Image (cartoon, rainbow, N blue to C red):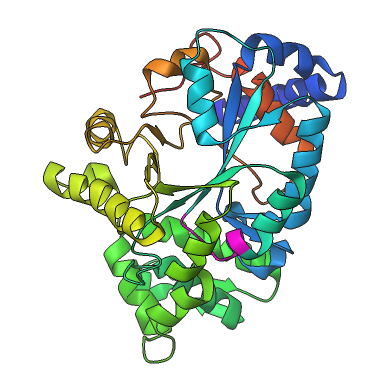
Amino acid sequence: MRQSGLKVQDKIKTALLYGTYSSGLYRVISRVAGGIGAVLMLHRIVQDKDETPSRYLTVTAGFLEDVILRFKKNGISFVSLDDMLHILRSQRGSRERFVALTFDDGYRDNLTLALPIFQRHRVPFAVYVPSGAPDRTMDAWFLRLERILMQFQRLETGALGNGRSLSLESPAAKAAAYEYCIELARQDLPGFKKWLHEVLPESAVSSKDLMNGHFLSWEELRQLAAGPLVTIGGHTISHPMLAKLPEDEAFREIAGGRDRLSAQIGKAVMHFAYPFGSPFSCGPREFALVGRAGFESAVTTRYGNIYRAHRHHLHCLPRMTLGGPAEGLAGTLLDVSGARTVLSKRCFAPVATA
């Protein structure tokens, strides 16, 4: 009964939320609850959602362009990370709200598909890169999972102790299987990685070849970094959960990735994104380490808008995900307006930090 009651509550909240959109009330809410702006998180740009089973990490090029045009129409300005810090540190407030667009991990499509869109609309953006991606030393096990799901029509997961047989006969089935497998990976990542290499051995597809097919090379990253619209940020060396590492090792990941990037692109790297970014993967210790490493700002994946109070929390700024399995302008506008926060438990404590 309790679960049924929760479902009813969720439906009521959803109806109320989208009612603020259809009525235009979200615009009024944004003046009160939307703070001064938002940082949006992306990973990969695709032409079609069916190109990969990891739909949560993809945004279609067409949707990205729609978002840019709609935000501009609504009077929201796009800013670089440096500009965002200037706004936060400024003593003078502004009625104009902003959005900062950020990409994690350094996928090649950030250069080939995203950059032309941003150039066309003169929109700045940031790319947080783990140095192990262009160095081709990072363990990109998730790319092997994607290759398996795209290559096969059925996948047996009995070896992982659950006995399920997954149909992979349609793009939707592959996407559902990806989410299921990610949950299995969270339960036992070392065992899951071993199983991936049994299903698709290194001799069949090397990890380096997988990375070559998806991630920017150093030359491509330098090309991207040379553009006036682009900020390159740090994202560690190997993309670990920093909170799980000893302090000295976590600091080496944070500072070492930054030093490697800076040496390769010939520019200072002053902004950082925590891998995974959840409370389980980074917290006060990591925030302090990033500050000690000399970064001016750092972003998490805690959900929330940016408020002026965040000038005191520059190393734990929240972000909102753009895109997902079902792309819709309504959902994105509701996020940035603060309407979703107003209808949540955080209504009276909207400033997300630790």
Question: Is 196 displayed left or right of 114 in the figure?
Answer: left
User: Is 110 within the magenta?
Assistant: yes
Q: Is residue 72 above or below residue 149?
A: above
Q: Position of residue 111 (x, y in %)?
A: 60, 62
Taking the image as drawn, is residue 312 in sight? yes
Q: Nearer the viewer, residue 174 or 302?
A: 302
> Which quadrant of the figure contains the N terminus?
top right
Q: Residue furthest right?
A: 23
Is residue 79 rendered to the left or right of residue 233? right
Position above or below: 64 against 350: below
Looking at the picture, does residue 170 appear above or below residue 82? below
Image height of 222 relative to 27, above or below: below
Which residue: 63% across, 13% down? 33
Quadrant of res 177 = bottom right
Asked whether 43 or 162 is in front, the reply is 43
Front in this rendered view, residue 289 or 50? 289
User: Which residues are the magenta region?
Assistant: 105-111
